[in-house]
């Protein structure tokens, strides 16, 4: 516990990996207390740490206060739907976390529903991994409603969640409306031809999704080819849009008006600014 405090007391500590350790409730509490005051740690990996619901509660309370952490990995633990509900309350308040990995837990559709409600409010989370969580079509339907409202999330992993055609149809409705999601993973989800066809139809309207993973689903080559062709078009258009954004930013910089673009999408602004200007 003292070692945790020492690590987080150091201003140079940016990434902390505690993976594959049975850290226990006392160490989690010490970590949570440190996170309440730490201002430098941006990445925390607690995967394979034998964490249960009671272990998550102090961490969740700390994350309501912490303003530095951007990436949290809680994959391969024993988190249940109540754990997801606690983390959902974090997402309603926290404004710095951009990546959350909850894969290989047991949050189910109830936990997913709580997270979906949080996504309607959250304005910072970009990547969410919920693979292997038994969310089923009910959880997927909740995400459908959230992603029709959310304008921040770009990457969503729902692999191995028993979504089936019913859940896929809900996600297809999302893709018709959502304009920010670029990567969606639906591998090993019992999706058949009917579900894949609804995705293909949705992509006729969608202009932003560039990656859709459907491996290990009984779909068929013809529909896969149709989906791949549409994704290629979206990828090409995305590159064209990025070039246009870069040109606009450069022009604004020449005119000393670069700050005016900040009122638009901050993610695009920051990425373009760092890479090209």
Image (tube, rainbow, N blue to C red):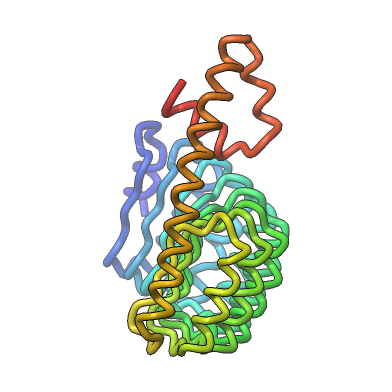
Q: Image point 41% across, 60% down: which residue?
A: 73
Above or below, comparing residue 43 to residue 173 in the picture = above
Residue 194 in the image: state x and y as whole percent: 53, 89
Residue at 51% from the left image edge and 85% from the top image edge: 163
- Residue 16: x and y in percent read 34, 49
* Quadrant of the rendered image containing residue 258: top right
Q: Work out which quarter of the rendered image holds the N terminus and state it.
A: bottom left
Residue positioned 72% across, 61% down in the render: 149
Q: Is residue 142 visible?
A: yes
Apparent side of residue 118 relative to residue 34 in the rendered image (left or right): right
Is 38 situated above or below 94? above
Image coordinates of residue 126 in percent, x first then y, are 53, 53
Residue at the (63%, 79%) spot, across then down: 170
Farthest top residue in view: 255
Above or below 81: residue 152: above
Residue 58 or residue 178, whichever sits in front: 178
Residue 154: x, y in percent? 53, 55
């Amino acid at each position: 516990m003292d070692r945790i405090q020492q690590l987080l007391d150091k201003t140079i500590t940016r990434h902390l990996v505690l993976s594959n350790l049975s850290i226990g409730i006392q160490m989690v509490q010490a970590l949570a207390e440190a996170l309440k005051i730490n201002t430098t740690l941006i990445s925390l990996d607690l995967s394979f740490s034998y964490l249960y619901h009671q272990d998550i509660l102090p961490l969740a309370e700390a994350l309501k206060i912490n303003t530095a952490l951007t990436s949290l990995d809680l994959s391969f633990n024993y988190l249940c739907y109540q754990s997801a509900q606690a983390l959902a309350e974090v997402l309603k308040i926290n404004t710095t976390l951009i990546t959350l990995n909850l894969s290989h837990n047991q949050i189910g559709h109830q936990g997913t529903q709580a997270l979906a409600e949080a996504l309607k409010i959250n304005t910072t989370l970009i990547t969410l991994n919920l693979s292997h969580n038994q969310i089923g079509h009910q959880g997927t339907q909740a995400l459908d409603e959230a992603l029709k409202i959310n304008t921040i999330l770009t990457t969503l992993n729902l692999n191995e969640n028993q979504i089936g055609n019913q859940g896929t149809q809900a996600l297809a409705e999302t893709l018709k409306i959502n304009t920010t999601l670029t990567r969606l993973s639906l591998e090993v989800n019992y999706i058949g031809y009917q579900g894949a066809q609804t995705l293909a139809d949705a992509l006729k309207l969608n202009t932003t999704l560039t990656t859709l993973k459907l491996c290990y689903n009984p779909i068929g080559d013809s529909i896969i080819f149709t989906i791949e062709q549409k994704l290629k078009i979206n990828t090409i258009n995305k590159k064209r849009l990025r070039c246009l954004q870069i040109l606009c930013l450069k022009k604004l910089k020449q005119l000393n008006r670069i700050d005016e673009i900040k009122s638009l999408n901050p993610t695009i602004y920051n990425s373009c600014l760092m890479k090209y200007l």
